[in-house]
């Protein structure tokens, strides 16, 4: 799968529900303050910055497949010597420096097609007894948006996303060697303002994998048509939240 490059500065400038999602994941980690935490899909470093505040004696290994995102994270975290930024593809074995006492991830795993393989790679980064907390799109996530996209003439097949249900996710975690598994689907629709705010959110956060292969004018037109096809200015998120122990 070709790694996606993001418009990191535009992404960071938007009001994002990801901020709230990240805080929830960090809260659920229950950190003591001296751990090494691996942040898979660290994006612009917002959650790495948040978790470092909980780690006065610890450090973060922040991993992403987008060099643009990592550069933005580098600027955000400049001067901090307790974070290591790593460029890595989550569809492949993770490099040896990606090891820690806990793993977290926010709004990333739905971009990875094989969750069974992914969870095996996550398990390989952790010692026995370590905590794994993540949040990502689950079954039903952005279904209304996808219907609007198709009405607007967007692709009907070949989605870049994997939205699994609780049963499949729990089974994949257990097969990877995790126990005390808890997975839940949480509807979390996000309402935006019609016009520029909605269109910017769709283009920057939801549709970059769709737009990257289109000429700029065609992509812009598709974003506008999709926004018009939404009955309400709402992105109908359904979040998979998982807790597991290695």
Image (cartoon, rainbow, N blue to C red):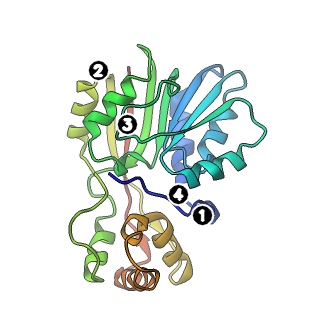
Quadrant in the picture for residue 118: top left
Contact, mark 3 vs mark 1 (Cβ under 8 Å):
no
Residue 84 pos. (x, y %): 63, 33
Residue that badge 4 annotates? 17
Residue 38 image position (x, y, % from top left): 53, 31
The reply, left or right, for residue 124 in relation to residue 157 is: right
Of labels 1 and 2, the one closer to you: 2
Q: Please determine whether, in this image, residue 129 is positioned above or below residue 27.
A: above
SS class of the residue under badge 1?
loop
Q: Name the side, left or right, on which 103 lies relative to 144.
A: right
Q: How crowded is mark 1: few (under 14 residues within 10 Å), some or many (20 or more)?
A: few
Q: Name the residue under label 1.
A: 15
Mark 3, residue position: 242
Q: Residue at x 75, y 43 (%)?
A: 78
Residue at mark 1 to residue at mark 2: CA–CA distance: 37 Å
Q: How many C-alpha atoms fall within 10 Å of the one at disc 2: few (<14), some, or many (≥20)?
A: some
Image marks 1 and 2: residues in contact by CB distance under 8 Å = no
x%, y% of residue 204? Answer: 50, 67
> Badges 3 and 2: C-beta atoms under 8 Å apart?
no
Q: How far apart are marks 4 and 2 (CA)?
A: 31 Å
What residue is pinned by disc 2?
177
Residue 19 at least partly seen: no
Say which label, 3 or 1, has the lower sequence index.
Answer: 1
| Structural crowding at the residue carrying mark 3, measured as other residues with C-alpha within 10 Å and reported as few (<14), some (14–19) or many (≥20) | many
């Amino acid at each position: 799968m070709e790694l996606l490059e993001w418009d990191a500065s535009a992404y960071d400038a938007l009001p994002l529900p990801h901020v709230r999602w990240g805080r929830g994941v960090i809260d659920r980690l229950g950190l003591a303050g001296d751990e090494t935490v691996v942040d898979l899909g660290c994006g612009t470093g917002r959650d790495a910055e948040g978790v470092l505040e909980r780690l006065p004696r610890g450090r973060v290994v922040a991993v992403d497949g987008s060099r643009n995102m990592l550069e933005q994270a580098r600027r955000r975290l400049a001067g901090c010597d307790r974070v290591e930024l790593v460029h890595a593809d989550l569809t492949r074995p993770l490099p040896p420096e990606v090891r820690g006492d806990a793993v977290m991830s926010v709004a990333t795993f739905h971009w990875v097609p094989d969750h069974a393989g992914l969870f095996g790679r996550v398990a390989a980064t952790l010692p026995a007894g370590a905590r794994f907390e993540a949040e990502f799109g689950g079954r039903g996530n952005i279904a209304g948006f996808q219907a609007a996209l198709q009405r607007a003439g967007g692709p009907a097949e070949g989605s870049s996303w994997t939205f699994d249900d609780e049963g499949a996710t729990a089974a994949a975690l257990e097969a990877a060697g995790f126990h005390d598994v808890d997975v839940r689907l949480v509807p979390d629709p996000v309402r935006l303002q019609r016009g520029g705010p909605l269109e910017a959110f769709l283009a920057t956060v939801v549709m970059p994998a769709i737009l990257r292969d289109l000429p700029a004018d065609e992509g812009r037109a598709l974003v506008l048509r999709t926004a018009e096809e939404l009955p309400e200015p709402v992105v109908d998120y359904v979040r998979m939240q998982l807790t597991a122990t290695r």
